[in-house]
Each structure stands twice: as structure tokens, then as C-alpha cells.
Image (cartoon, rainbow, N blue to C red):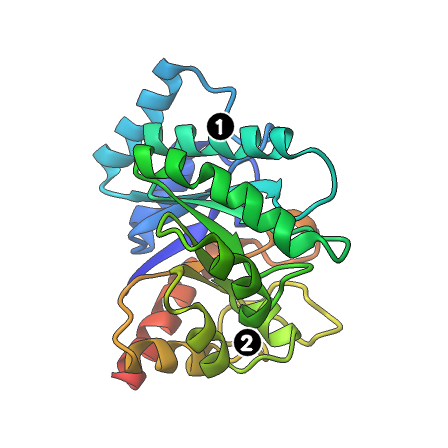
Amino acid sequence: MKFAFSTLGVPGLPLPDVLRLAVAHGYHGVELRVHPEEPVHPGLGPQARAGVAADFKAAGVEVLGLAGYPRVAAPGDDEPVIEEIRELVALARDLGAPFVRVFPGGEDEHADAVAARRLGTVAEYAADLGVRVLLETHDSHRTGADAIRVLGPVGHRQVGALWDVMHTWLGGEQPLETYAALSPYLGYVQVKDIASAQDTTPLALGAGVLPLAECVEVLTRHGWDGWLCWEYEQRWYDDAEPLPGLLSGGRDHLARLLNDSA
């Protein structure tokens, strides 16, 4: 498996510094949070996009994915959501990123059908550009069982799942259950750690209660050899310990889990 971290853990940090952290601490890739307050967003012109791609290539670090914020199950018109996803997919293609993250964001009984319709609409566009759109286990669809109610009807290879281990755990789903649901669709896995269901302040990997060892064991036992991406949500928690000082320990913890599960 390969290791990445999300720039959500270093909000607003210039990309050269992000790349230095990745190289210094032995990470193979970076998940880029896509937002106007970050260095990478759909407003970047062609020259800027080419520069970002070149910087990653020169550093020997991969752009794992773009963490966007379209809410595919939210009420309202389809077209603004579809256009937002298309913009992210085009940006991912330009940066060489294989994945784009979207959220569910459902609010009513129509959420599954709305999300499936929108994702189905963008699937061929994503296929043409060589990018997979991943529905994260989050908010209204926090478990694997929730996610497949959308992904099953879509039925397209370019629309898959992003397994956020915190949300499936908060939803009461065991790692084996999540993997069984998501394995036909799985793009990559977001790892993290927290103190409890009541206190989701990010912690160093291994310092909290999330079943990271079980997740890695299930993945390894089933021969899955994709990406583990540490999403340390520093952006939302001012009191969290800064991520840079934790990166080496996090990489070592993931390596130990892989070794123990081999």
C-alpha cells in the first residue's frame, strides 16, 4: 500500500512546503483540499495547473486526489452540482490526479436517487478524462451500506467510494462489513484517529479509538493494495497538535500495521 496525507492537515500551506513535508517524512502522495482558501482550486489557469503538476513530478510525489465539496445528494437543481463536479474532474485531469472526492449531503427521502442521477450523469465525462469520482462515507451516507444505495444504481466504473474510517465507525459498521460493501467500488481509504465519538478532535494515528489495525488487516487479508490517506482535520480544530510534527510517526504507525497484518 501507498501512504498519503491530506492538505486539510496543513490548511493554506504553500505547495512547495507541502511537497517538502511529503518527501521529508516518506509519503508517496498528497490529497489536495480544493477550496478558494487553498493553493489549488478550479480557478487556476492552464499555466498554474501545469506548474503544480510539474512541481509534484519533480518532487517524486503523486497527487492522489482532489478533495472537493460537491454535495451530490443535496436538494436543489442538478446542474450546479454536476458542473461543480465537472470542474473538479477537469482540474484533476490537468494535475494528474486519479480521484475526485464528493460528499453525499442528503436531506430527504429522495437523496439516494438524486445522488445516483447526478453521479451517473458525470460518469462518462469522468471516464473520458481518466478520473474516478468517489463518494465519501460521510454525513447522510456515513456507512458502506449507505453508500452502496447510491453506487449500485449508478453502476459505472468511474464512480466509486472513498472509505472514511471515522464515519463508518461512528455509523456502527465493522471494518469487515464496510469492506464487503465497498470493495467493488473502493478508490482509496482515509485513515485518522480521535479520542471518542463525542470528541472528534484529530489525534496522532494510534492514539485514539478508531479500529485502524482492523481496517488494515481486512484490506491486507483481501489483497487490496491501494492508498491509505491520513486526513488530519486541523482546519476545523484550532487546538489540535500541528500535523507536521506528527507525520513521521503516522507513517511509521501505518507501516507497523501493514507489517503486523502481513
User: Measured along the vertical axis of the image, is residue 19 above or below residue 171?
Assistant: above
Which of marks 2 and 1 precedes in the sequence? 1
Q: Residue at x 42, y 41 (%)?
A: 123
User: Can residue 40 be seen?
Assistant: no
Q: Residue 78 appears at what percent x and percent y?
A: 64, 35
- Dot 1: element: helix
The reply to whether the C-beta atoms of the residues labelled 1 and 2 are less than 8 Å apart is no
The label on residue 168 is none
The quadrant where residue 194 appears:
bottom right
User: Measured along the vertical axis of the image, is residue 247 above or below residue 35?
Assistant: below
The reply, left or right, for residue 135 in relation to residue 157 is: right
Q: Residue 190 appears at what percent x and percent y?
A: 47, 61
Q: Residue at x 63, y 62 (%)?
A: 141
> For mark 2, does the 10 Å Cα neighbourhood hold few (<14), some (14 to 19), or many (20 or more) residues?
few
Residue on which the image places disc 2: 207
Label 1 or label 2, whichever lies nearer to me, is 1
Residue on which the image places disc 1: 87
Q: Which of the two residues, 242 or 157, is positioned nearer the viewer here? A: 157
Q: Amino acid at mark 1?
A: Glu
Q: Residue 150 appears at what percent x and percent y?
A: 55, 58
Q: Residue at x 60, y 54 (%)?
A: 233
The reply, left or right, for residue 254 in relation to residue 33 is: left
